Amino acid sequence: DQQVKQNSPSLSVQEGRISILNCDYTNSMFDYFLWYKKYPAEGPTFLISISSIKDKNEDGRFTVFLNKSAKHLSLHIVPSQPGDSAVYFCAARDDSQGGSEKLVFGKGMKLTVNP
Amino acid sequence: DTAVSQTPKYLVTQMGNDKSIKCEQNLGHDTMYWYKQDSKKFLKIMFSYNNKELIINETVPNRFSPKSPDKAHLNLHINSLELGDSAVYFCASSPPGYNEQFFGPGTRLTVL
């Protein structure tokens, strides 16, 4: 039972264009969302996050949008750079157990930015 | 100045063996985690410890036993290894009050 879904396994974009990575979730108890970036043979690294009380958070080239009613979030990268090529994981915090910082991850999406 | 480190990076072993994976963080974080990334690429939490106390145990088989000698270390011991245990295991840590978790480089376990 996937509570966090990244339905597109891969995305390929040209350098300088926008990359849009999508994520859907099913659990209305999720109150905080994160994007992680992962290079091969390395651990995931935190990229950007958003609280459920906001609908947008921006950090440089990276912007995350949250649509709570649709249970959907997206990560926009603009302009995309070849160094952005990696696997991106969407994650959500499950607060249903109260106080434990449990993250639920999607299965990731591979982004390739072509020079 | 590695933040979260794991050893070994690769581990190949026979079915039925017992093995351990070590994790250390030098970030001063209170909470540490173990995640498993299986062949389908899902990253799923296994355990979480806060100041050496177990706070999350996600119905992991008893063959998996985490041990936290101090808050900077969280080791994972696996008994009677099975083929299905083959995966990449990630350790992570987080400071109190923060949702972001910092991951180690992973340990690729292959059970033959």
Image (spheres, grey):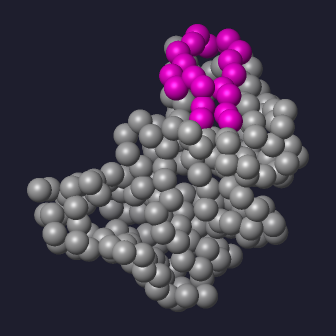
Residue at point 85%, 48% (across, down):
B51
| Quadrant (top left/top right/bottom left/bottom right) for the N terminus of chain B | top right
* Left or right: where A109 falls relative to B76: left
Above or below residue A49? Residue B12 is: above
- Give the percent coordinates (x, y) of residue A17: 17, 72
Numbered label tally: 0
- Quick one: which residue is furthest to the front in this view? B1
Q: Nearer the viewer, residue A40 or B57?
A: A40
Residue at point 72%, 30% (across, down):
B76
In the rendered image, is residue A112 in sight? Answer: yes
Above or below residue B32? Residue B6 is: above
Q: Could you say which quadrant of the image residue B99 lies in?
A: bottom right
Residue at point 58%, 67% (across, down):
A92
Q: Main secondary structure of the magenta part?
A: strand
* Left or right: where A112 falls relative to B57: left
Above or below residue A104? Residue A38 is: above
- Give the percent coordinates (x, y) of residue A112: 23, 55
Q: Nearer the viewer, residue A108 or A81?
A: A81
Q: Nearer the viewer, residue B25 or A98?
A: B25
Q: Could you say which quadrant of the image residue A51 lies in?
A: bottom right
- Give the percent coordinates (x, y) of residue A52: 60, 82
Residue at point 68%, 18% (across, down):
B19
* Left or right: where B84 falls relative to A35: right
- Give the percent coordinates (x, y) of residue B71: 81, 43
* Left or right: where A110 falls relative to A31: left
Above or below residue A65? Residue B86 is: above
In the rendered image, is residue B57 in sight? Answer: no
Residue B112 forms part of the magenta stretch: no
Residue B10 forms part of the magenta stretch: yes
Magenta segment boundaries in residue numbering: B5-24
